[in-house]
Image (cartoon, rainbow, N blue to C red):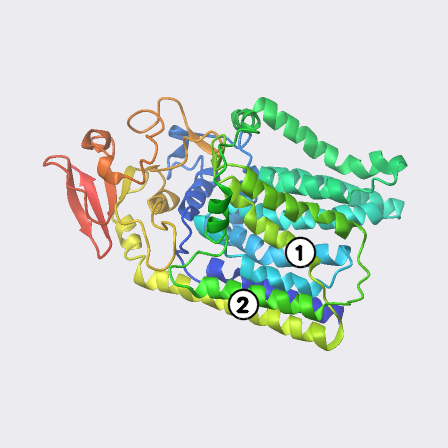
């Protein structure tokens, strides 16, 4: 029976990961950034790409290091693009598996992990905040190990378990500070405070990760900025606006209403689960009651914090999805027929929501991506390329999935692309001083959003090519000439 359950949940993980590999170009806004950055790291000293002339690696100064380190290792086997797909699969498929382990440690029915599948393709994922979502399954796994550590009794196994928890806590910190912070809240809430003689033993595994926090806040520019920005993340929006916008930051990812309908069905399934679960006899661990602090705190911080934390955008907006995911362990689940009904509903929702996402991603690929591969093929490798995206929107998904498509050139052929994130303090690859594209420093705010405001003096003669989506680029005679015109993309080469 256990073997059957393992196979079943592995199949669930494969199903949940389908949006990552179903198309070549998923409509995630920041995805091209992450693929090109992984290419920079993986091929940094490869002369074919020419990265080390203009950039330096900032892995010691970024809080996203683990995402790119793991991706770099995988890229040696699968290549950069498939390594990025694998990283997305770790989030999409790993989250239900990690939540399953946490549910078991809490004494809850592991079938409840199926309810997380419809929550996986959310607004933060569609924006492409991949290091952020990558930390979510690690966070659930770290809580599961922490509970096992608190309840462990075998001294020999205890040491291995404690070391494993310590390594995972450090990995979680270097995956994303947001997930690490939530882990810390849950760890403190579930900590066995009633056993003071064991405080040092139970707390020891997280000490190395806390030392990493101290080092990061003292030694890295991003850490100093983020730590200094605590408590002043910007004025929070009026509460009524936060209530109105809650769907925008959770379920509203497609232009049509199919995603909202999925979430309505999910809410109805949750109500059925609560109704059928009344009177359920569950042997839950006492830590479950204290774990409620996590979804409650996420809810409070969504309303109480602002959009920015230092240089990090979308701060308060990241809390609603973790709030929903961490609320799943509080659903009641009965055995017998009632449990089978709930399980059937959860499976149907998992399949239906994933099929809906995949169908939209396929439509985006077929109807909107256009001939980006042909456009990139027209440009020589390791050149300077500016991407002017006049037509950045989509009729399939919300957000602006084409905004950073120029980074696919850098991912495939190296060189320098603008717009890029390589000037940000928190990014793992940064421009060397004196190597910034015109105007010689980070571009003005919203450069990528307003291509019509980019002056020709900023483009010519620095850039070898200008990659354009949409209409609006009309270079003066003697600056750039057209070398490719497709149905969606054009390429201009410097005269």
Q: Is residue 170 above or below residue 457?
A: below
Q: How many marks?
A: 2
Q: How far apart are the alpha carbons under marks 1 and 2?
A: 21 Å
Q: Give the mark toward the camera: 1 or 2.
A: 2
Q: Which mark is residue 99?
A: 1
Residue 134 point in image, percent of width and height: 56, 47
Q: Seen from this angle, which residue lies furthest left?
A: 477
* Point 23% across, 33% down: residue: 459
Is label 1 in contact with label 2 (beta carbons under 8 Å)?
Answer: no
Kindly state the secondary structure of the residue where label 2 is placed. Answer: helix
Residue 428 point in image, percent of width and height: 49, 34
Q: Nearer the viewer, residue 284 or 84?
A: 284
Residue 76 point in image, percent of width and height: 52, 47
Kindly state the secondary structure of the residue where label 1 is placed. Answer: helix
Disc 1 packing (10 Å; few <14; some 14–19; many ≥20): many
Q: Is residue 35 above or below residue 217?
A: below
Q: Which mark is residue 265?
A: 2
From the image, which quarter does the C terminus lie in? Answer: top left
Disc 2 packing (10 Å; few <14; some 14–19; many ≥20): some
From the image, which quarter does the N terminus lie in? Answer: bottom right
Q: Is residue 100 left or right of residue 485?
A: right
Instruction: Confirm whether residue 26 shows in the render.
Output: yes
* Point 47% across, 39% down: residue: 237
Q: Earlier in the sequence, mark 1 or mark 2?
A: 1
Q: Nearer the viewer, residue 125 or 145?
A: 125
Q: Which mark is residue 11?
A: none
């Amino acid at each position: 029976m256990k073997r059957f359950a393992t196979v079943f949940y592995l199949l669930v993980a494969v199903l949940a990961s389908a949006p990552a590999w179903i198309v070549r170009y998923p409509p995630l806004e920041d995805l091209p950034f992450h693929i090109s950055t992984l290419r920079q790291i993986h091929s940094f000293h490869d002369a074919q790409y020419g990265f080390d002339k203009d950039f330096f690696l900032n892995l010691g100064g970024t809080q996203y290091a683990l995402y790119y380190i793991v991706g770099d290792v995988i890229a040696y086997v699968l290549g950069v693009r498939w390594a990025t797909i694998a990283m997305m699969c770790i989030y999409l498929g790993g989250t239900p598996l990690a939540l399953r382990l946490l549910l078991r440690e809490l004494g809850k029915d592991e079938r409840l992990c199926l309810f997380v599948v419809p929550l996986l393709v959310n607004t933060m994922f569609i924006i492409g905040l991949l290091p952020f979502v990558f930390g979510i399954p690690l966070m659930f796994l770290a809580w599961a190990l922490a509970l096992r550590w608190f309840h462990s009794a075998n001294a020999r196994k205890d040491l291995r378990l404690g070391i494993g928890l310590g390594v995972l806590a450090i990995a979680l910190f270097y995956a994303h500070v947001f997930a690490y912070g939530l882990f810390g809240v849950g760890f403190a809430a579930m900590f066995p405070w009633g056993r003071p003689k064991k405080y040092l033993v139970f707390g020891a595994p997280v000490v190395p990760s806390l030392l990493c926090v101290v080092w990061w806040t003292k030694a890295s520019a991003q850490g100093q900025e983020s730590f200094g920005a605590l408590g002043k993340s910007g004025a929070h929006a009026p509460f009524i606006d936060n209530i109105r916008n809650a769907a925008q930051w959770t379920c509203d990812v497609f232009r049509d209403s199919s995603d909202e309908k999925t979430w309505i069905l999910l809410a109805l399934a949750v109500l059925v689960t609560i109704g059928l679960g009344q009177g359920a006899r569950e042997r839950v661990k006492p830590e479950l009651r204290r774990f409620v602090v996590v979804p409650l705190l996420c809810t409070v911080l969504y309303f109480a914090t602002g959009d920015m934390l230092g240089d990090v955008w979308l701060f308060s907006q990241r809390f609603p999805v973790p709030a929903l995911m961490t609320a799943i362990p509080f659903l009641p689940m009965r055995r017998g027929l009632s449990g089978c009904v709930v399980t059937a509903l959860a499976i149907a929702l998992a399949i239906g929501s994933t099929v809906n996402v995949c169908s939209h991603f396929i439509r985006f690929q077929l109807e909107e991506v256009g001939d980006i591969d042909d456009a990139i093929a027209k440009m020589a490798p390791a050149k300077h390329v500016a991407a002017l995206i006049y037509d950045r929107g989509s009729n399939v998904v919300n957000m602006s999935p084409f905004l950073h498509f120029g980074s696919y050139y850098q991912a495939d052929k190296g060189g320098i692309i603008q717009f890029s994130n390589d000037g940000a303090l928190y990014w793992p690859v940064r421009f060397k001083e004196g190597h910034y594209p015109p105007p010689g420093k980070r571009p003005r705010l919203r450069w990528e959003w307003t291509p019509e405001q980019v002056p020709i003096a900023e483009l010519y003669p620095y850039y070898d090519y200008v990659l354009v989506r949409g209409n609006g680029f009309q270079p003066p005679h003697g600056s750039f000439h057209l070398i490719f015109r497709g149905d969606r993309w054009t390429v201009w080469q410097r005269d």
